[in-house]
Amino acid sequence: MAQLVQLGPGLPAGSPLAGPLIDTFGRVHSDLRVSLTDRCNIRCFYCMPETGAEFLPIRGLLSFGQIVRLVSLVLPLGIDKIRLTGGEPLLRPKLPELIAGLSGLRGVRDLALTTNGVLLSSAAGPLFDAGLRRLNIHLDTLDRERFQTITRRDELARVLAGIDRAVDAGFHRIKLNAVAIKGLNEPDIVPLVRFARERNMEVRFIEFMPLDAQHLWALDRVLTADDMIEMLEREFGPLTPVPDADPRAPATEYRFEDGHRVGFIASVSRPFCANCNRLRLTSDGKLRNCLFAREETDIRPLLEQPDSDLALEAAVRSTVWQKWAGHEINRATFVAPQRPMYAIGG
């Protein structure tokens, strides 16, 4: 992958000066993932070390004003879907103020927040009142012992209470995200789907990816989408691919005969790089054109300047234009990103 332009003047050769955010492979980008913090209140082993994680100082995080400014700038460029991530975004004080600022922007078609749910009981009401309508809640297991093994924290009861509180607050578009790891949480695949079906929610199973801080990933630990589909069909009957699915969405959706759905983010066994439409902003102001990118563009200096909109747009266009074909997880040429998952943003 070519070195990304670091805030230099102009754009790479061939990059469009106007129109949608497009890369050299013709992929049009409409989805921006914004990490609000690298801090977290649990320690999932596939994301963070149990101790010794290094976090940004609070002053190192982008301000809410800077985030709203960037989102306002990219909306006219075709970005219409915003997801707030972390770390754990509910650790940011006064988060409803950011939600209100973003939900009030014309052109935001979809605003979502990904959370581990630990603090959701107290946050759900204020977030809903501020304009948030969609939640992705991370939940790998319903078993307390396995929850502690995965997260190194005994917080399952608080997460489950947070889910109930979110429903009571008015959230009706809730998805549960679960990382699937062979030899660990196979027993949770069916119970998680049953839990979601009973609450009219949808589970998105995520194949274990090489983004952990301790380099514990191995291909033989990946519980694949095909493995999970086989488990679920034995329990609930046939699964049919959703025919009208968005080809740019990271999850492949399936429908049970009774209409309930389940999704699989199969980055390892079924890479979807050819249809990727996502751009990422880290909590310290770096633009990344791929979750596995080896380079990033520092736009924080521009966000700190009041009259830099043209340069900001050029930096965004340049970052998208230089996106590579894909992450190459299944190839010998694959190199894991230098940043662990919690420092990139989910």
Image: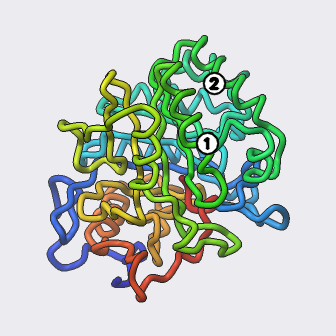
Q: Residue at coordinates 59% horizontally, 62% vertically from top-left?
A: 341
Q: Position of residue 344 (x, y in %)?
A: 56, 61
Alpha-carbon span between mark 1 and mark 2: 18 Å
Question: Closer to the camera: disc 1 or disc 2?
Answer: 1
Q: Earlier in the sequence, mark 1 or mark 2?
A: 2
Q: Residues within 10 Å of mark 1 (few under 14, many from 20)?
A: some
- Numbered tag placed on residue 180 in the rendering: none
Is residue 121 positioned above or below 69 on the image? above
Q: Is residue 112 visible?
A: yes
Is disc 1 placed on a helix, strand or loop? helix
**Amino acid type at mark 1:** Asp
Q: Position of residue 108 (x, y in %)?
A: 34, 33
Q: Is residue 41 visible?
A: no
**Amino acid type at mark 2:** Ile
Q: Residue at coordinates 35% horizontally, 83% vertically from top-left?
A: 1
Q: Position of residue 64 (x, y in %)?
A: 57, 41
Residue that badge 1 annotates: 188
Q: Residue at coordinates 24% horizontally, 46% vertically from top-left?
A: 78
Q: Residues within 10 Å of mark 2 (few under 14, many from 20)?
A: many
Residue pushed farthest front?
A: 234
Q: Residue at coordinates 51% horizontally, 59% vertically from top-left?
A: 223
Is residue 61 positioned above or below 290 on the image? above
Is disc 2 placed on a helix, strand or loop? helix
Quadrant of residue 220 within the rendered picture: bottom right
Q: Which residue occupies the foreground of this view, 197 or 69? A: 197
Quadrant of residue 202 within the rendered picture: top left
Residue that badge 2 annotates: 163
